[in-house]
Amino acid sequence: MACTGQSVFAGTDEISSEAEGKDLKTEISDYIQHHLKDSHDFSLFSYSDDQNITHHVGLPLPVILWDNGLVLFSSSKLHHGESVAEAGGNYYKAYHGKIYKTDSEGTINYDESHHPTNIKPVDFSITKSVVMILITGFLMFLLFRSLAVSYSKNNNIAKGVGRFFEPIILYIRDDIAIATIGEKRYRKYMPFLLTIFFFVWFLNMFGMTPLGVNVTGNIAITTALAILTFLLTNFTGTSDYWKHLFDPLGDSMPWIAKIPLYIILVPIELLGLIIKPFSLLIRLYANMQAGHIVIMSLIGLMFIFKNWIGSTLSFGLAFAISIIEILVAVLQAYIFTMLSALYFGFASEEHEHAEAH
Amino acid sequence: MEKLIEDFSVGLFFWQTLLFIALVLLLWRYAWKPILNAVNDREEGIKNALAAAEDAKKEMQNVTADSEKLLKEARAERELMMKEAREIKEKIVSEAKEQAQVEGDKLIKQAQATIESEKKAAVTDIKNQVAELSVDIAEKIIKEQLANKDKQLKLVDNMLNDIKLD
């Protein structure tokens, strides 16, 4: 991330000094906003040449749209929102990371609050985030497959990099799954818990690299994960879990007395059902988003200060925050896994419990 | 909130869901299952090995205890045997002594009896011989004395006197 930031800011810095009036702070703010969003191409860095033309270095990715039929073209056609892409007789233009259907001129109409009113086709593009998900998945598969193979080859003893990951797997099994779900039923949740922990952790860590991908800080990603937790919780819920949901007081009082209470209690319980995964998705999203904003802002400060003391301080601070972010990366993965396991634990509990919430 | 909804990309959501489920299933089949099984097997193995070691230790203790018990028993038996032997020895010795005593006493008594009877026989013999000698002497003396008449008479007188005195 640091590299991307520096090269870009170095470029924009020159522009701003030449084309006076362009505010560096706005420039940096825009850059951060841009970075936090998903993008249609895998850009590594960009620079401006002598003619003040910005060049982007990176890989174009396929754009897949559903616009009364499948539309497919390379993201290089969009030129980072600078030109209009033509595909299947229709014209498309990217604006703030979103693709809109336009006319051949690429005009985008705005409403009063400056929101585009153009038709927005459903975007199934293989974006930068999707590429990172694929890379992470591939990496995880290689890593844990090699660990699995090393067991069978090496008489049930891990070898190589698996030695580092084995204790983590055991920790998730013993201190997260068994501790919250229980010895009897933890097994069926293990694949999900292990996958989600390493998936979130690895993607968080990738976010710390100069590749500058902000996958786990994307609301769509955390929503997908939280919905999976929600579905798994409710589809594996025992009858006790459902009984607790719709009859939280149980047999402790006659049914006639329960009716007025349940008018309030049951909606609260049902709301809790939604709030639990919602808190999961917001927590991960907000933490990763905030981490990226803070680090990028501090890096940006170096270019705003442009003096030895201020920039050095900013660098020191950015460095310190980066280290904290590395901890946050594993912490957020842990929290997501832990809370998912906790919800699974509630859902799979079989006996009556008074202290569920 | 509005910004969040605006930022929400349906495509990314779709890919994330699809890829994540695929990843869970793939890892489940090819990684988590074998890893967890291997770890479980290993833990079971360790548990069993520990249990076996514990058993062996107990067995060992039992064996030691058994051998100690045997040793103690053997020692006790040996002592008992020694004691018995001593007793037997003492008994034999005392019996022998007693027998010897009895035998000795018997021998002594026999010897005494023999001596007594020998003595009696000797005394009787001596008496007989003395009597014979006395008679011989008396005969000779009488023969000599009765050679003259006076003396014969005097003898008769003496004898008569003796008888009277008796």
Image (cartoon, coloured by chain):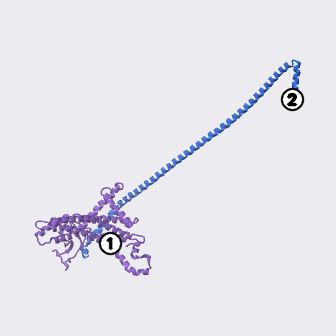
Chain colours: A purple, B blue
Q: Is residue A344 left or right of residue B131?
A: left
Which of A114 and B16 lies nearest the eye of the viewer? A114
Label 1 – label 2 distance at C-alpha: 169 Å
Q: Is residue A49 left or right of residue B72?
A: left
- The residue located at (32%, 70%) in the rendering is A228
Q: Is residue B152 left or right of residue B3?
A: right
- The residue located at (36%, 69%) in the rendering is A344
Image quarter (top left, top right, bottom left or bottom right) of the C terminus of chain A: bottom left
Residue B160 x %, y %: 88, 26
Question: Which element is circle 1 on?
Answer: helix
Residue that label 1 marks: A277
Mark 2 is on which residue type? Leu
- Callout 2: chain: B
Q: Is residue B75 above or below residue A306?
A: above
Residue that label 2 marks: B165
Query: Which of the two marks, 1 or 2, is nearer to us in this view?
Result: 2
Residue B101 x %, y %: 66, 37
Which of B115 and B131 lies nearest the eye of the viewer? B131
Q: Is residue A275 above or below residue B99?
A: below
Residue A125 x %, y %: 24, 69
Does the rendering let one see residue A74? no
Tell how many labels: 2
- The residue located at (39%, 80%) in the rendering is A261
How many other residues sit within 10 Å of disc 2, few (<14), some (14-19) or many (≥20)?
A: few
Residue B11 x %, y %: 26, 71
- Callout 1: chain: A
> Which quadrant would residue A351 be assigned to in this image?
bottom left
Q: Is residue A32 above or below residue B35?
A: below
Question: Which element is circle 2 on?
Answer: helix
Does the rendering let one see residue A272? yes
